[in-house]
């Protein structure tokens, strides 16, 4: 037994340093599934996508599991093991694999690590902002215009329901809305009871589609009114919807929908 133990220790000393680091969390590089799981399912804390919002890798926050992997001036990211192309892209950008979790490979990149305390503070701030945005949108109507869509009129109720008057549609379209938050972005998400698709993005109506909150507040493109100004709630058909393809003023919209009382513009 004594000779065997000496043999094992000697073999361990011969292993490359990066090989030892690769097994820090008790797993190897082999992907055991081809589907996506959350970082939390592998004992990690996901913060946000990396390097871009649409990427599959994520920035990882500091916890007891990852503490020993952190070096000064670096931060950790993790990529699903089966996303070999994404992992190679990160390596090409000078990232280094330092460990493997259950379904994620962990890499070290230049940056500043996010502590659990910082993450909790950010989550608390985001939670308050989400509540604020929900209050702003509840029981309010947004009108907007773009070259792709034309003029859209949309009422948000306080329970997450939304009613959309869209150019060319013969009826008001019912859907749902919600507010999502990540480490550094707040998004408003929509889906609708239709199999039609968004002509700008190709997303099917039944699927959730999210956009930055800033898009809604962008001056010159969106007007925000208090209440169901154009009486869209549970409304069926609405008049002359092809006219919505034009850029219509508030006065023109009121005339189109047969509304005589002036709307109250919301402030925030």
Image: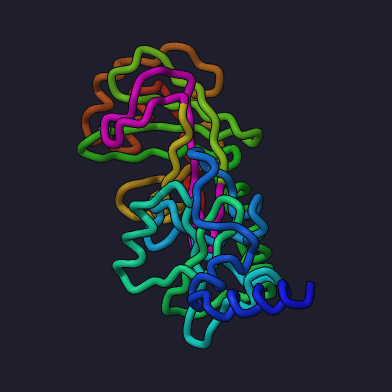
Tell me which segment is drawn in magenta: 180-206
Point out residue 193 in the picture as x, y percentages from the top left corner. Answer: 48, 20
Q: Position of residue 263 (x, y in %)?
A: 47, 39
Query: Looking at the rendering, in which quadrant would you find the N terminus?
Result: bottom right
From the viewer's side, name the closer residue of 128 and 2.
Answer: 2
Point 66% across, 78% down: residue: 9
Q: Is residue 72 left or right of residue 26?
A: left
Main SS category, magenta section: loop
Residue 121 seen in the figure: no
Pick whichever, 197 or 15, lies toward us: 15
* Relative vertical location of residue 62 with respect to residue 149 in this rendering, above or below: below
Asked if the magenta segment contains residue 29, the reply would be no
Q: Residue 100's image quarter?
A: bottom right
Would residue 144 be found to the left or right of residue 72 on screen? left
Residue shown at 56% from the left, 48% from the top: 180
Q: Position of residue 3 (x, y in %)?
A: 73, 76
Residue drawn at point x = 49 percent, y = 74 percent: 18
Q: Residue furthest bottom?
A: 72
Who is closer to the viewer here, 119 or 70?
A: 70
Q: Does residue 33 appear anywhere in the picture?
A: yes
- Nearer the observer, 32 or 39: 32
For residue 245, side relative to residue 259 (left or right): left
Image location of residue 71, percent across then percent down: 53, 84
Q: Residue at x 64, y 36 (%)?
A: 158
Above or below, 131 relative to 205: below
Examine the structure image and report whether residue 195 is included in the region drawn in magenta: yes
Question: In the displayed image of the protein, which residue is found farthest to the right?
Answer: 1
Residue 120 occupies which quadrant of the picture?
bottom right
Q: How was the colour assigned to the protein in this rendering?
A: rainbow
């Amino acid at each position: 037994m004594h000779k065997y133990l000496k043999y094992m220790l000697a073999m361990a000393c011969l292993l490359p340093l990066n090989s030892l680091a690769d097994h820090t969390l008790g797993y190897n590089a082999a992907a055991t599934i081809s589907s996506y799981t959350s970082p939390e399912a592998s004992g990690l804390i996901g913060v946000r996508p990396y390097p871009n919002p649409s990427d599959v890798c994520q920035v990882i926050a500091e916890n007891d599991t990852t503490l020993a992997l952190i070096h000064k001036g670096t931060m950790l990211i993790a990529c699903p093991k089966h996303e070999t192309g994404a992992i190679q892209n990160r390596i090409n950008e000078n990232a280094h694999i330092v460990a493997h979790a259950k379904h994620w490979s962990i890499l070290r990149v230049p940056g500043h690590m996010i502590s659990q305390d910082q993450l909790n503070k950010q989550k608390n701030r985001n939670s308050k902002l989400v509540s604020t945005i929900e209050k702003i949108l509840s029981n309010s109507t947004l009108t907007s215009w773009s070259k792709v869509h034309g003029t859209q009129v949309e009422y948000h109720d306080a329970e997450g329901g939304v009613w959309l008057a869209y150019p060319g549609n013969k009826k008001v379209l019912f859907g749902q809305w919600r507010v999502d938050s990540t480490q550094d972005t707040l998004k408003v998400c929509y889906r609708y009871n239709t199999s039609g698709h968004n002509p700008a993005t190709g997303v099917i109506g039944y699927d959730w589609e999210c956009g930055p909150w800033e898009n809604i507040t962008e001056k010159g493109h969106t007007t925000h009114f208090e209440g169901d100004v154009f009486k869209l709630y549970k409304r069926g058909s609405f008049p002359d919807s092809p006219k919505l393809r034009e850029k219509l003023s508030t006065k023109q919209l009121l005339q189109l929908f047969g509304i005589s009382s002036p709307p109250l513009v919301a402030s925030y």
